[in-house]
Amino acid sequence: MDCADPLHHQFVSRLKNAKFQEIFYRLSRLFLTNFMKLMFASGRTFVNTPSIMLSEIQKVKLPKIVQSEFPNNIEIDEETQFQMNTFVRNSRVIYFSNIKTGNHPLDIRLIWESGRLQNITNAVFSTGNIPESIQEKSKKTVLGWIQNNPFLHGVHYMSPMECGLRIPVFFYILKSSKLNWNKDEIQAILSSIYWHSWWVSKNLAIYSSLGNHTISECIGLIFGGAVFQKTSEGQKWITKACCLLDQEIYHQILDDGGPAEQSLNYHRFVLDLFWLAISFLESNNLKNCSEWKNRLSKGEKFLNSFLYNGKQIPSIGDSDDGYAVAPGLHPDRHALDPAGKSTSISGLEYQNFPDSGYTIIKSQNGLFLTFDHGPLGMAPLYNHGHADALSITLYKNNKPFFVDSGTYRYNGVPEYRAYFKSTRAHNTVCIDNTDQARQLNGFVWDKPYQAVLECAGDKGSFLYFKARHDGYSRLKHPVIHTRELYFSRENIIIISDSFTGIGLHEFELNFHLDPNVILDFENGWIKQTNGQEEIFLYDYEHSIDTIRGEKKPLLGWHSPSYGILEKTTTLQKKKSGETDQINFTSLICFEEDKKEHAIQFKKEILMQS
């Protein structure tokens, strides 16, 4: 993994991609941050909350929220929780820009998660009979948070995105019908809504920072603007947010419905943020969002195509397990036709998404495979993309076998952050122990690759796909990686990796297994079992190594959800030599009694090549 010097290269990359308007914008943000710091130091502030009656807020309607299956919470051990609480408590008197987190082992993402206060939302939208005591406790929690986190002091003001996601929670708790309020309590929450909205409006993630942060911040401005819609400032917030969302729905959701950020979980997050905006804006007659719905329909069809057991999607790209509303709740996504276009031949079908760069292959008897031939991520910084060109994931009857390694953590463990983003952590080929693009820090990339799907379709007796990427063309001796996939009607898969270029190189093919997979070596085959399902990988040369939980270098690790790290098995095959003399041929069979058919299919393919 070729991680560059983080501070120098990140600065150079941002400067290289910045135009005059962005430089001016960033300087103005810096000036405002320092100006507010001086204001607080002198005991003054010029952010004055307009007067507004609670009766006015009661006229603003809640968005429609739907309950869903409650997911598992992020597991945090007692020692880490204690350290997090101590860090937050000690930072409350510190102006946010003076807080240093760079060398701290704690994950700031986990700290920010609790500061979103989204757990409070369940007490407002739950369809069950929530006791008044629970709602009263939720109100006290919000008021306590406001008191303990004065404006622009502490870790929870470091990210405008987090401020944006908190604003709807303040609004939800004000709308709770079972609560009694006094004047001071109402004013405390209204002031927080106004101050948060004002700060977000001055610090929007725009220009090279556009991404899911931008959408989150717009959500905050819409809710804050609706609360203060009788003021000119509130109207400006709504207008600014809607203009940005008009732009970003076509920027972040591609024409095929896929994500510009190359992250499936963040795509779910962004789509839900848009649905939340639609429900709230239309319920309050603030905007006609029918054009957005057409675009979101494409996004929903894209994600539905990746569902491998009716509810889960592969963890491709970054994921922090964030929610637009709260765990167990999501906005009304409307009744949409879940079916996307697919091409079928003899029990095999595939869907190709040319803009986002994914192909999905399915069969009637249990095959589910994803093939990534898309770009690195959203230019110019590619924040949430992984260097996973030509990587696959493979499932049989909803049981995972070859999986994406996941994300693990964003902060506090830089070596693991670098690993989980790396080419080595994905089911593709790594050359010279180097990523397909260059990591500048935990988020920013440069030297992006181009990936191209050259062929896809029916070859008579089998399905065939061919793609290549140029990520290693930046090496001293450039290499182009080409991957071909062959699928027979009997669920036999051949993965062929070949290379063009010059010079001597080291080539490393990795397949990362689900942690539940058990291996058994049988007469040149590697039998993989997960529950009641099994697949077979041909290893007649006995050249495949099994690696599990190695630390130097990192390999054989899996993160099923954010913050969770567990050992898994990686199947690895290495070769060294002249580029045009190297190739890998991986033969996978779904049924034990089809092994001989698989070997014959491989011979037929090699003869045609």
Image (cartoon, rainbow, N blue to C red):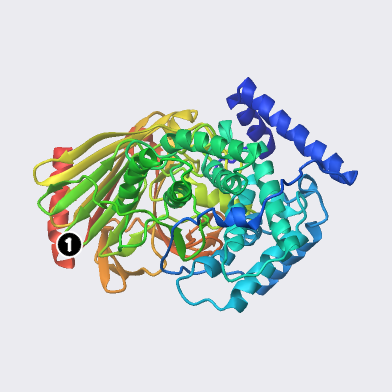
The relative height of residue 598 versus residue 583 in the rendered view (above or below) is below
Image spot of residue 259 (x, y percent): 41, 42
Residue for point 23% across, 58% down: 367
Q: Is residue 485 visible?
A: no
SS at mark 1 in the image: loop
Q: Position of residue 409 (x, y in %)?
A: 57, 56
Mark 1 surroundings: few (<14), some (14-19) or many (≥20) residues within 10 A: some
Locate residue 319 relative to residue 341 in the image: left or right.
right
Residue 294 visible to an observer of this rendering:
yes
Position of residue 126 relative to residue 64, above or below, is below
**Quadrant including the C terminus:** top left
Type of the residue with mark 1? Asn
In the picture as drawn, the residue positioned furthest to the right comes out as: 42
Residue occupying the point 72% across, 52% down:
191
| Residue 553 as seen in the image, left or right of residue 428 | right
Taking the image as shown, residue 520 lies to the left or right of residue 38, namely: left
